[in-house]
Image (cartoon, coloured by chain):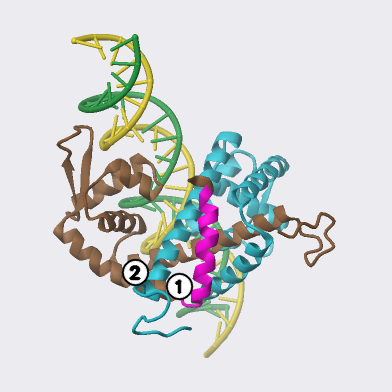
Chain colours: A brown, B cyan, C green, D yellow
DNA sequence: ATCAGATATTTCAAGCTTGAAATAATTTCC
DNA sequence: GGAAATTATTTCAAGCTTGAAATATCTGAT
């Protein structure tokens, strides 16, 4: 909370606003690099893609069938997007659509047995990969990061 | 570097690996939410897109004309992608391609006067928007984040 | 001088992503 | 009970993104 309007402190010429921008650009860069790495890993090692993985991961975490809307809200993607990715996964037999009994507008999506088996393979390898990406971070870093990210996320409640 | 195989420490059941995964998922979520916010802002307020903004920002930062390869390397996107975004910006008169004198394989891309003027408008608003997104973070947070991100980025040198 | 390998860019097909429009079903409120 | 507003999903056109293949050019070793 160092307020220093005339910039006589340790950061002489850099406004807070510029610092925020720089941090955002760096954050975006690091995140994109990590995403690119994981995408490459999924393609080369498992012949799949990040969006497919994301959908399967969301379904896996819940275990209980999930509506298309819940899915797209959870993944922060548009409804139309969720539809097409699920379409492809369904065609490959990894995912199943079941119309809801209670609400005829709704469909419930869930992993098939094949999908579940494939995902468990995938998830183990993926976790190992993430582990490597974050290997330079200590436990203390995680505490701090968790706190910072929580505060950042507050905006988009 | 706390090695505690039997988990008798302060984090009883949670392995470091699981923590890394959770942190990555949260980081990805926050970054995507912020990106979505900025995309929405660019669309509604300036009738443009994030990739277009990214290209213009890269060209602006350098001032000196830039090859397509440098551009795609800087933005972490494929060559083909850079080509199509530049195509569209060029068609809109915001960007210019000039063949290199020294190397006939190379084209140099730069902002046109129109592009420069438009970008300066855009950049000011964009900075204000980022400022809002990060308003909950203190100066101390930035110091820490900078350090953490630097260590994370080391992998993808 | 030539040729093999490296580098710069574009093109291409396929998949991803969006926001808006279309359809269908449900809920709310009079 | 029925009209109006809301919600769930799909479809659509346009743009984004990728990796691989095609072209063109350059560089370096012989």
Residue B133 at x, y percent in the picture: 59, 49
Marks 2 & 1, CB-CB < 8 Å contact: no
Asked if residue B135 can be seen in this view, the reply is: yes
| Residue labelled with disc 1 | A133
Label 2: few (<14), some (14–19) or many (≥20) C-alpha neighbours in 10 Å: some
Location of residue B73 (image quadrant): bottom right
Closest to the observer: B88 or B23?
Answer: B23
Residue B91 at x, y percent in the picture: 58, 40
Subunit of mark 1?
Answer: A
| Residue labelled with disc 2 | A126
* Left or right placement of residue A13 versus residue B76 in this view: right
Q: Secondary structure at mark 2?
A: helix
Q: Is A135 one of the magenta-colored residues? A: yes
Closest to the observer: B103 or C9?
Answer: C9
Vertical position of residue B28 compared to residue D8: above or below: below
Location of residue A127 (image quadrant): bottom left
The magenta stretch spans which residues? A134-154
Residue B58 at x, y percent in the picture: 64, 55
């Amino acid at each position: 909370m160092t307020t220093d309007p005339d910039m006589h402190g340790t950061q002489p010429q850099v406004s807070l606003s510029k610092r925020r921008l720089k941090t955002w650009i760096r954050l975006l860069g690091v995140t994109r690099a990590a995403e690119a790495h994981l995408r490459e890993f999924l393609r080369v090692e498992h012949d799949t893609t990040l969006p497919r993985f994301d959908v399967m991961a969301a379904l896996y975490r819940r275990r209980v069938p999930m509506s298309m809307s819940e899915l797209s809200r959870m993944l922060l993607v548009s409804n139309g997007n969720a539809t097409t990715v699920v379409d492809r996964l369904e065609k490959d037999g990894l995912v199943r659509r079941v119309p809801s009994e209670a609400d005829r507008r709704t469909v419930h999506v869930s992993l098939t047995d094949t999908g579940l088996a494939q995902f468990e393979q995938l998830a183990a390898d993926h976790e190992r990969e993430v582990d490597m990406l974050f290997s330079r971070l200590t436990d203390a870093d995680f505490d701090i990061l968790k706190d910072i990210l929580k505060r950042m996320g507050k905006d988009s409640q």
